Image (cartoon, rainbow, N blue to C red):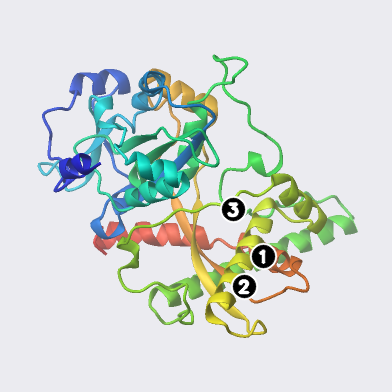
Amino acid sequence: MTERMDRRRGSALRKRPPAIDATRAESETGEGREEPVSPTGRLFREPHFSCYIVSVFGLGARVDLAAVRAGLEATLARHPRFCSIQVMDELEDATPKWVRTTVNLDDHVVVPDLEPTGTSADPDRALESYVSSLSTLPMDHSRPLWELHVLDFPTSDADAAVVLRVHHSVGDGVSLLSLFIACTRRAADPDALPELPTTGAARRSGPVYALPSRPLLAPSSWGALAALAAWVVSLLLLAWHTLVDVLCFSATATSMLRDPRTLFKGAEGVEFRPKRFVNRTLSLDDVKYVKNTMNCTVNDVLLGVTSAALSRFYFRKTGESGRKSIKVRSTLLVNLRKTPGLHALATMMQSGKDNGAEWGNRLGYMILPFHIAMHDDDPLEYVRKATKVARRKKSSMESIFTYWSASMIMKIFGIKA
């Protein structure tokens, strides 16, 4: 791992590197143009906003390294973003572009040399520590911005693990999740893609808000008039909630509105410190049981569980009275782009072309309040309050405004602003 860190130290964005395979780029994309990096992607590669997506996959067997390399060559290494680098062409403009290059898997498949005593004595801790080190380790921008780390030792949850680290400028989490699934095949039919649910919330992959559908009026129908009135009211509520959220977001961005000082608020520079990833396994059947009983969504239940966990942590650490109620806020990123289907992503990797499928980062923000209080007598109160907050946020276009305003600021004042 030390050798990898030394090789990456001092790396920077390439300026017209000689290793670019221009012939492959033109033949596989079908066009000689280079695709510019999106405004959000440019933001993610700024030194003070550098973000990585770190995904840990537990395996049911030890790692077959040859099979892993063969699978990568047939899937991720052929995806347009995973075989491209960001190049700054100062002769034309100062906007970085995606340019195809040759993928050398030796640069992307990392098998770290870890101490056997550490991995055998406390494998879970060893896995957490290694993943934590990846949260701040820089990437070499002279090669495609992804890595697969092979941790071939058993933990309490799996026989082995692989860690995929991708720079956030390559794509958003929703797109990458679909891409990872498209890289897999069914155990019963190795040539078939897995099937995903297509009903209910699983079918929705666009913005979290929904414009109310305009009702069709029938002549002399009181029911139709009532439906029209309800539609007008819901539209007015959407506009009002959006206005309130935009004002609150603007006040927060200008430091006019702040959260109280709590142990959740990090000190200056906390975003550049290593992050430790911990997890807790929950029963999905239990979550769905609460969801069906309380007539809410899975996300509402998980939001309530998070509020409960933060509340117990806060009052245990501070020793304050549980009768006190605090509201802290978090920034939630929202995907605003339709996610490509599995078949579209599989075809993209097979052909090495975009094939018209949308890809990249199109993210908005919303401020999500967390209810910090003790409800030992009625723990479901956390879910009720979380459901109320989630429904209120869905009746707002805050995420659309934040995406639009960030894009306008970038276009008018530049990436530094």
Q: Which residue is mark 3?
A: 208
Q: Position of residue 312 (x, y in %)?
A: 61, 71
Answer above or below: position of 10 versus 327: above
Q: Position of residue 360 (x, y in %)?
A: 39, 41
- Dot label at residue 386: 1
Residue type indicated by callout 2 = His
Q: Which residue is mark 2?
A: 371
Answer above or below: position of 327 versus 195: below
Label 1, secondary structure: give it: helix
Answer above or below: position of 158 versus 206: above
**Mark sitting earlier along the chain (1/2):** 2
State the separation of the CA atoms marked 3 and 1: 15 Å
Residue type indicated by callout 1 = Ala
Q: Position of residue 206 (x, y in %)?
A: 56, 46
Q: Residue at x 37, y 52 (%)?
A: 132
Say which of marks 3 and 2 sits in front. 2
Task: Say how many tags the image has.
Answer: 3
